[in-house]
Image (cartoon, rainbow, N blue to C red):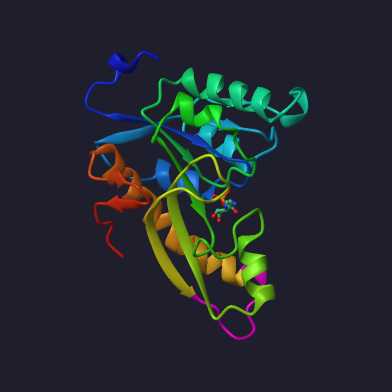
Amino acid sequence: MPRDTVDTAGRVVVLASGSGSNLQALLDTAESSWSVVGVVSDQPEAGALQRASRAQVPSRVVEWRDHSDRNDFTEAICAAAEEFAPDFIVLAGFMRVLGPSAMAHFPDRIINLHPSLLPAFPGAHGVRDALAYGAKVTGVTIHFVDEHLDHGPIIAQEAVEVLAGDDEAALHGRIQEIEHRLLPEVVTKLVKGELAIRGRTVKGRVSA
Ligand code: GAR
C-alpha cells in the first residue's frame, strides 16, 4: 500500500452498509489532520454511497453474495479499501463481520462504532436488544476491531439513558446524536497518534 502518498493528512476509509449518517458526520468534520478519502459498502443501495457521491468521495461496492465465504469477502473488502491507500478504516454502520485477514491487512488500524455499551448487547441489533432486555442505560462504544465480534479494545464509551416509552427509533436517534459527535473526535485522536493499545486498554482520553 502506498503509505508514502500520505502527506500531512490522514487518509480515512469508511465502511458502511446503511444510511450513512455517521459517514456524513465524518464528511462534515472540518479537521485538517484527516479526511475521508473513500467509502466501501456491501449494499449497492446504501444511503452512504449517495452521501459519498454528493461529497465527491469515491466509493466501491463489494457484495456479500458475490463471494464464496467470509474470507473471500473480507479479501475483496480489503482490496477495495486498499485502492484508497488508507491510514485508518472506520466501520460506521457496516453490518458484516470481517474475517481475521482484515486485521492482517490493517493491524490496529480498524475501528468500529457500536450502539450499546459493550460488552452488553453485541451484534446486529444492539439498540433493540437493550430495549428488549429492559436496560435502563445503554449507549455508544467505539473500539478497535479484533478477530472477535464487537470485542476489541475500547477507545470511547458514552451512556444514553433509556426513557420510559422509548421505542427503537427514539432510542437509536439519541444514540446517534452521541455517535455523530464522538466518532469524529475519536478519528482525530487516532490520526494524531494519541491512542495507544496496551493489552485490552486504550491509553489516550477522548472527551465525553
Ligand atoms: C449506527 O447507529 C451504528 O452504531 C450501528 O449502525 C448505525 C448506522 O447508522 N452499527 C451497528 O449496529 C453495528 N453492529 P448510519 O448508517 O446512519 O451511520
Q: Is residue 41 above or below residue 4?
A: below
Horizontal relation, residue 73 to residue 40: left or right: right
Q: Is residue 190 above or below residue 208?
A: above
Residue drawn at (40%, 66%), measured in percent from left and top?
Answer: 158
Viewer can see residue 57: no
Magenta segment: 161-169
Residue 119, percent from left and from top: 52, 61
165 part of magenta stretch? yes
- Farthest residue in the front direction? 199
Residue 11 position within the rendered picture, expressed as x and y whole percent measured from the top left: 35, 28
Q: Quadrant of residue 29?
A: top left
Whether residue 179 appears in this view of the structure is yes
Examine the image and state in which quarter residue 196 appears: top left
Look at the picture and state if 169 lies above or below 34. Answer: below
- The question of residue 129 being in magenta is answered with no
Q: Count the marks: how many? A: 0
Residue drawn at (28%, 37%), measured in percent from left and top?
191
Dividing the picture into quadrants, the one containing residue 17 is: top right
Image position, residue 123 (x, y; %): 63, 54
